[in-house]
Amino acid sequence: MIRLSLADIAGAVDGRLHRAEGPEIVTAGVEFDSREIEPGGLFVAVPGERVDGHDFAAQAAANGAVGVLAAREVDAPAVVVPPVPAADRSGALALAGDTDGSGAAVLAALAKLARHVVDRLPQLTVVGVTGSSGKTSTKDLIAQLLVPMGPTVAPPGSFNNELGHPWTVLRADESTRHLVLELSARGVGHIANLCEVAPPRIGVVLNVGHAHLGEFGSQETVAQAKGELVEALPADGVAVLNADDPLVAAMSERTRARVVLVGEHPDARVRAEDIEVDGRARPKFTLVTAHGKAPVTLPLFGEHQVANALAAAAVALELGATVEEVAERLGSVRRVSARRMEVSETADGVTVVNDAYNANPESVRAALKTLAAMTRGRPSRAWAVLGPMNELGDASADAHDEIGRLAVRLNIDRLVVVGEQARVMHQAASLEGSWGEESVLVPDVDAAVALLRAELRPGDVVLAKASNSAGLWRVADALLGAGGGAA
């Protein structure tokens, strides 16, 4: 973060000083975990379901925090922020465990502080990425393509909400040239609020799918929310839109910015042609642009990564990279965020694909197609260990039914469905293929692990995929052992 005094911070967030004079300078990062505080840092006291950050203010100060951003007076130097009216505590500022509104107050203040920092960094190019699936992977790709062009800040994993978003913004300082942000939404207006925190100049919309459909109600409402990113772009900005998704391509009518279409569609300005995948499901394609073309071989798993790579390529090209530079950098990217197409091998030769960070119908389809490609034409067996896809509302039964049937159509050898919430997958697979033991429903992760350990053989490939709350990453961890496996 840029150097700021506690008085500067108080002014930026409309707060007041407590047990502080004001000249004290914050020289290190902003943290909401008191254990992560470095000397010179600022501690953000966020209340949670189990603990309240305000109770750790003194510990944060003992660990070197210059001050605390707090909603009430604490036993440490602090900037105490004003309350948020009760009517404004729902929606984007809703926080589990926030019984008295202190969480909403701290989040609102953190957003103001982040905006204050962005406004003092005129050299900064803010890139925003949203979509129903692929946000984190694409954010990671964009950051890797931009690093050779200047200091770049991007969030770890999926820090994409009202806490992680400003936290990431505050990692930027005077040396930062690119700030790559992932924007999520649980309702209409959430992305617009995040764009107020760090106004983007480049906005990337990947797709409009079924993720969180239970909260949004329809894909059209999802599109309304995702399109808030392109509406926030300035007239001299750039909207990178997926030409292969009609709901995304239609967002070109909602922005003042220049539109760059990406995809396989003939109208795409940044396009992929001649797509192939190798025996490990790693894609290669020809990157086609108005300024030339170049071959790309991605060291990532799954044909769906091509769309993510095109979006990242478009951003890098807009910021000055050549087609050849983009192709070369795409050839050396790596998976950054955990539990997303994380491919490892056990000591006895079983390949484990840990894609269990989260799941929606689109991402599960992509993962199953990747699994099928990894075993096609080989004696190895494909095992899909799948759990529930949450937050699908009225579409849940049909979505789980479709996935179960798709597993059969892709010739997946064994389907292990984990948990009663996902029973429809097992039933659909059994009906589609008249399967017997090829599909099995198990009650929990432990049962899935026991089955796999009893039946796996060297050369088999196992995919673990479900919504994060199902914890199917524990299947991958159990198979790989405490020490993990070879990548």
Image (tube, rainbow, N blue to C red):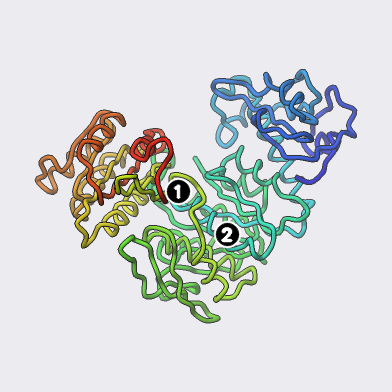
Residues packed near mark 1 inside 10 Å, few (<14), some (14 to 19) or many (20 plus): many
Residues packed near mark 2 inside 10 Å, few (<14), some (14 to 19) or many (20 plus): many
What element does badge 1 sit on?
helix
Q: Where in the figure is residue 191, as x and y percent of width and height?
A: 57, 47
Q: Is residue 391 visible?
A: no
In this view, 98 is above or below 260? above
Label 2 with label 1: CB-CB less than 8 Å = no
Q: Where in the figure is residue 70, as x and y percent of width and height?
A: 73, 26
Q: Residue 18 appears in which quarter of the rendering?
A: top right
Extreme residue toward the front, this view: 347
Residue at x 61% of width, y 37% of height: 163
The disc, 2 or 1, on the residue closer to the chain's N-terminal end is 2
Q: Is residue 427 left or right of residue 289?
A: left
Could you say which is closer to the camera, residue 484 or residue 239? 484
According to the picture, the residue beneath numbered tag 1 turns out to be 222
In which quadrant will I find the N terminus?
A: top right
Q: Amino acid at mark 2?
A: Gln
Q: Where in the figure is residue 41, as x and y percent of width and height?
A: 76, 35
Residue at x 77% of width, y 18% of height: 75
Q: Amino acid at mark 1?
A: Val
What element does badge 2 sit on?
helix
In this view, 27 is above or below 154? above
Residue 144, numbered label = 2
Could you say which is closer to the camera, residue 457 or residue 464? 457
